[in-house]
Image (cartoon, rainbow, N blue to C red):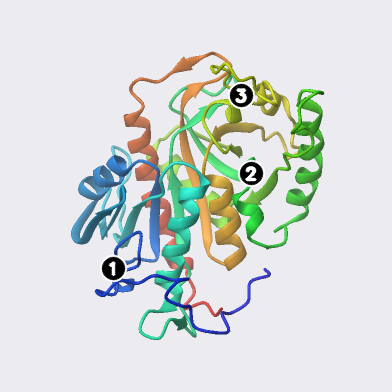
Amino acid sequence: MSHVPLSTPCTEADLPIDASGRIYHLQITPEQLAPDILLVGDPGRAEFIARTFLHDLEVEQEHRGLVTATGISCATGDRATIISPGRTTVATSGMGTPSLEIVLNELVALNEIDFSTRAQKATFPRLHVIRVGTSGGLQASTRLGTSIITTYAVGMDNTGLFYETPCPDQTCARLEQELAEMVKNAANASSRFRGKIHPYVSRAEPAVVRALTQAAKKLGVAARTGLTVSNSGFFAPQGRDISRLRPSTPDLDRMFSQFDPGLGGQRVENMEMEASFLLHFLGGLGHWGGAICPVIANRRDNTFDHEYLAAVESATKTALLALATLRSLRPDSLRP
């Protein structure tokens, strides 16, 4: 990790805090954040999770379309029950890594910064953050409704490039080189942007991957592990061609579906818009991140799951059970 402790307190301009001690965008106080966090893109989904899977709510705040709620987690299923309910926060990340960057920074600041002095705390809890989202499946063999548990994320956005942290392992370094060449070769030869898209690769915390995999098995949730591509948008950045402006890099979805990452049979399973930065940012800081995203569209078959909310609910139960398992692995505290 390349992070360093903050040497001076954050200024008011760098870290806006209102007169009630609430952080600017999320509008909650440090005391209202739990170290176990579910992140979802849709504010309506955050409200649904809070009211369905949390009880004894301490806070349910909405500001700028960002819903944040903290309460005690509870989830039951036909085949398993969470035995150790715990304090959990569910938060809206918004669509895409630019919005997620704001939310993640504020969650980490709420956890690590003393708001009375604006200085770095000497110790703080390790955050466990799991994204529960929706995604497009890239493999024809992946059935609609299957939850994809991310092992590595390919960042086709550029948000992660503004945060310096080394590759967590040699797989990330290798994939970055291979994918940069692949994306360059796939671009139109005449494109002014050919060679300017450089993917970065981030890794889900292996313990989170294991916890999610085990939770899905216990709950009987259809799931598979694999690589996730995080794109900077929904249409051309994901290979969709519906505009009169042609994509600079056509058929991105098909290109990634055919790529072999050389990871024991894993494939690039899905596309979405947030996992890359989530794993890059949290991993660089020593917090634990993961992602579980049901496939609600299959790009090879051109099919869409109109009843996808059931799959999202199953993924939410899986994430909550994984967080319950991970609590026993949390150290007493982290140091910056």
Find numbered disc 3 in the image and state the secondary structure of the residue it sits on. Answer: loop
Residue sitting at x 53%, y 34% = 233
Q: Nearer the viewer, mark 3 or mark 1?
A: 3
Q: Give percent across and percent down for residue 71.
A: 24, 60
Residue sitting at x 57%, y 32% = 270
Three-letter amino acid code at the position of disc 3: Gly
Q: Which residue is mark 3?
A: 239
Can residue 226 be seen at all in this image of the molecule?
A: no
Quarter assignment of residue 32: bottom left
Lower position in the chain sequence, tag 2 or tag 3:
2
Three-letter amino acid code at the position of disc 2: Gly
Lower position in the chain sequence, tag 3 or tag 1:
1
Badge 2 crowding class, 10 Å Cα cut-off, few under 14, some 14 to 19, many 20 or more, is many
Q: Is 140 displayed left or right of 48 in the figure?
A: right
Comparing 243 with 183, the one in front is: 243
Find numbered disc 2 in the image and state the secondary structure of the residue it sits on. Answer: strand
Q: Is 75 displayed left or right of 273 in the figure?
A: left
Comparing 231 with 131, the one in front is: 231
Q: Which residue is mark 2?
A: 155
Badge 3 crowding class, 10 Å Cα cut-off, few under 14, some 14 to 19, many 20 or more, is many
Q: Give percent across and percent down for residue 44.
A: 28, 40
Q: Which residue is mark 1?
A: 32
Q: Give percent across and percent down for residue 103.
A: 43, 56
Lower position in the chain sequence, tag 1 or tag 2:
1
Residue sitting at x 29%, y 65% = 28
Q: In the rendered image of this protein, does residue 125 appear above or below residue 123? A: above
Quadrant into which the N terminus falls = bottom right
